[in-house]
Image (cartoon, rainbow, N blue to C red):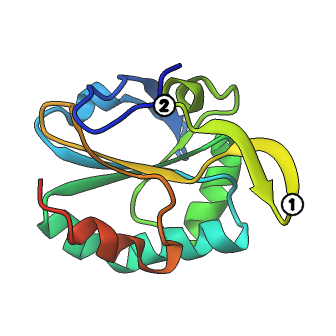
C-alpha cells in the first residue's frame, strides 16, 4: 500500500473497541479525529503516550478532536489498559492488522540495530470531511497532545 499523506482521504474502517462495541470511522463524520496507532497496551512508551492524551483530553475536546487509539491488541487487553490508566477515549482492536495495513503503519523497525517487523507509532489527524490534514510519523509520546494542539487545520 502507498504511504498515506496529508490531503488524502482517510481509509474508512470498522473496528471493535474495548467495550466490545463495533464502530466505524464514518461515525465520526463532521468531527475532527486524532487516530493514533501504538504498538502494545501496557508497554512503557505506549502508556506514556496514552496518559499524555488522557491528561490533555479536555483540551483536545475543546479544540474539537475525538481521540481513537488503535493497536493490534484485542478488546480484553484494551479494557485492562483503559481501566488501569483511566483512559477516557476509545481503543480500537486490530489483531488481524487489517486497519494497520490500510494505514500503512506496519513495517520494518530498527531498534538498537535489530531489525524486525512491527507497528510504527503514527498519528493521523483527520478533518471533518475525512481528509488527513497532518501525519505524525514519530510522535513524541511525552508531549504528543501538545504537538497535536499546536497544529491548525
- According to the image, label 2 marks what residue? 103
For the question of whether residue 37 can be seen, the reply is yes
Task: Work out how far the residue at label 1 is from the one at label 2, CA to CA, in angstroms.
Answer: 25 Å
- Residue 75 image label: none
Q: Do the residues labelled 1 and 2 touch (CB within 8 Å)?
A: no
Left or right: where 67 falls relative to 61: right
Kindly indicate the quadrant of the structure image that contains residue 54.
bottom left
Residue farthest toward the top in the current orientation of the protein: 1
Kindly indicate the quadrant of the structure image that contains residue 60.
bottom left
Q: In this view, does 123 lie above or below 93?
A: below
Q: How crowded is mark 1: few (under 14 residues within 10 Å), some or many (20 or more)?
A: few
Residue at image x 44%, y 77%?
52
Q: Nearer the viewer, residue 52 or 88?
A: 52
Residue at image x 65%, y 71%?
45
Q: Nearer the viewer, residue 10 or 33?
A: 10
Residue farthest toward the right in the current orientation of the protein: 114
Task: Tell me where residue 79 appears, x and y as whole percent.
Answer: 61, 54
Residue at image x 66%, y 52%?
39
For the question of whether residue 86 can be seen, the reply is no
Q: Nearer the viewer, mark 1 or mark 2?
A: 1
Task: Tell me where residue 153 appears, x and y as whole percent.
Answer: 12, 53
Left or right: where 7 falls relative to 98: left
Residue at image x 51%, y 24%?
102
Badge 2 marks a residue whose secondary structure is loop
Q: Residues within 10 Å of mark 2 (few under 14, many from 20)?
A: many
- According to the image, label 1 marks what residue? 113
Q: In this view, does 58 lie above or below 25?
A: below
Task: Tell me where residue 101 appears, x and y as whole percent.
Answer: 58, 26
Q: In this view, does 123 lie above or below 25?
A: below
Badge 1 marks a residue whose secondary structure is loop
Q: Which callout, 1 or 2, points at the residue further toward the start of the chain? A: 2
Amino acid at each position: 500500500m502507498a504511504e498515506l499523506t496529508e490531503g488524502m482521504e482517510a481509509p474508512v474502517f470498522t473496528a471493535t473497541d474495548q467495550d466490545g462495541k463495533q464502530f466505524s470511522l464514518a461515525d465520526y463524520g463532521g468531527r475532527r479525529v486524532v487516530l493514533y496507532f501504538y504498538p502494545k497496551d501496557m508497554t512503557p512508551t505506549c502508556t506514556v503516550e496514552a496518559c499524555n492524551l488522557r491528561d490533555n483530553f479536555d483540551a483536545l475536546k475543546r479544540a474539537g478532536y475525538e481521540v481513537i487509539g488503535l493497536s493490534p491488541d484485542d478488546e480484553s487487553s484494551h479494557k485492562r489498559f483503559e481501566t488501569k490508566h483511566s483512559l477516557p477515549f476509545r481503543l480500537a482492536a486490530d489483531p488481524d492488522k487489517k486497519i494497520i495495513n490500510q494505514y500503512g503503519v506496519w513495517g520494518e523497525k530498527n531498534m538498537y540495530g535489530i531489525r524486525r517487523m512491527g507497528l510504527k507509532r503514527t498519528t493521523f489527524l483527520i478533518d471533518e470531511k475525512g481528509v488527513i490534514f497532518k501525519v505524525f510519523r514519530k510522535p513524541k509520546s511525552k508531549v504528543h497532545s501538545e504537538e497535536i494542539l499546536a497544529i491548525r487545520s
